[in-house]
Amino acid sequence: MGKKQNSNNILKLFPAFESKNYRYYFIGQLISQIGTWLQIVAQGWLVLQLTKSPFLIGLVAAAATLPSLLFSLFGGVIVDRFDKKKLIVITQASSMVLATILGVMTLFGTINVWQIIVLSFLLGVVNAVDMPARQAFVSEMVEKSKVPSAVALNAGIFNAARVVGPSVAGILIALVGVGGAFLLNAASYIAAIIVQFLIVPIVHKKPKHSHPIKAIKEGLSYTWTHPVIKALIILTAIVSIFGWSYTTLIPYMAETIFHQGAAGLGYLYAAAGVGALLAALLVSALAHKFSPNLFIIGGNIIFAVSLIAFSFVSNLYLAYFFLFLEGFGLLCAFAVINAQLQHLVEPHFKGRVLSVYLLTFVGFFPIGNFQIGLLSEHLGPQMAIRIGAVIVLFAAIIFFFAKGRVTRAHEEYISDKIIDSATIDVSGRR
């Protein structure tokens, strides 16, 4: 009886777990994401050992995210046109092959920074389809009312992996080497592929598809004319370029500021991951009880202020504390932003709008990585992080003061949509 009561309490807090589809997906993605974080830490460490250059660390990170800038919009069209479940199997298998190549070349000592850049770019091309596919697939795994919980738990998967992956990465690098860590990541994709065959998607009516270029224009137009979506996308772009890019400098700061090796680097990543994981659980359990703006604005302010504080410290334990707060704030904001987009967008635009979101959140990483790498070369890594965090803080404050105007514009937008629909119903044409 006690176990059943506990199970019911968990389902009330995290409604997405009521879906068998989502339970399968959760397990597979958790294993896969732990492997991904193994590779992120191992690759950053490998580039640092090969080059000792924060600029080249940033360049490798930019190569991984540049395809999102170039191809995300086309990825969104692909996601709206084809079976998302099959797409995810293909993209996860492709990522496994690339991780295997990287691992083998590293083990045989034939790897150099330019080969890492090429493989990172190819992985980025795969992610330009994989990421919007996985984001849009949420609404095909769970009922609409459970989407916010599923989105928050997806963020929880990512950040639980960010806790576990970096924490064990340092140990694994010492035990099996960097190449071994890459191969373990390749093996982790097997779980993500297997669970896809266990998931039975909710069937949605397939819309007619226009020409890809026209479909991209329609998606961009829809995004830009929807007041709330537009505001969320602009805020996302600012945080991506000036805030999230700080992660590029963590390997360099671990060695030069905090005097840590691979294990210490993993703990710095994990500190932010613990904060983000706590935020993901909080959002999944409480997002329906409070205004989304509370999480979005409050989360960004916590993120920016804690990042500014982090840029001033040289004590390792203070660094852990402020990175914990940074992860908490960032995830509070972006789990709710993602859920809001999933809630607001019409189903036949979902892949394209989410691809625009990922374009700004991930695709703008190259711009962020380049600017923070360049600033750190001239002003130092701490000042580079500080400047970006101040910009994010001002953006959050502006968003706070603009929220009333955005809400009124959204109400007018909805009214216009209702009038347009009524006109079509009566006349059969515009």
Image (cartoon, rainbow, N blue to C red):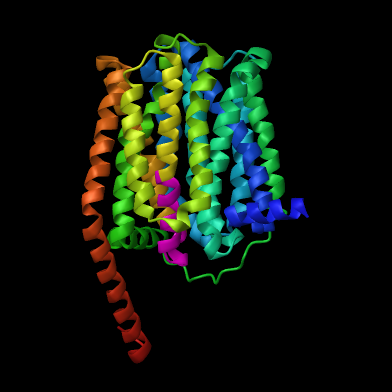
Let me know if residue 70 appears in the view.
Answer: no
Residue segment shown in magenta = 333-350
Query: Quick check: is 396 in the magenta stretch?
Result: no
Picture quarter with the N terminus: bottom right
Q: Position of residue 232 (x, y in %)?
A: 33, 51
* Outermost residue, front side: 2
Q: Is residue 100 above or below residue 410?
A: above
The C terminus is located in which quarter?
Answer: bottom left
Q: Is residue 233 left or right of residue 41?
A: left
On the image, which quarter does residue 301 sit in? Answer: top left
Question: Is residue 141 positioned above or below 371 on the image?
Answer: below
> Residue 101, how many percent across, how many down?
62, 27
Residue 222 in the image, given as x and y percentages of width and height = 33, 63
Q: Is residue 259 found left or right of 416 in the rendered image?
A: right
- The residue at 47%/58% (across/down) is 288
Q: Is residue 10 left or right of residue 112?
A: right
Q: Nearer the viewer, residue 22 or 73?
A: 22
Magenta stretch containing residue 339, yes or no? yes
Q: Which residue is drawn at 42% across and 32% down?
A: 325
Q: What residue lies at 49% left-to-right and 60% top-to-bottom?
A: 80
For the view shown, which residue lies furthest in the bottom direction?
426
Please state the horizontal and vertical placement of residue 324, each as a whole percent of the image. Answer: 45, 29
Q: Which residue is pictured at 38% across the width and 17% down the height?
A: 54
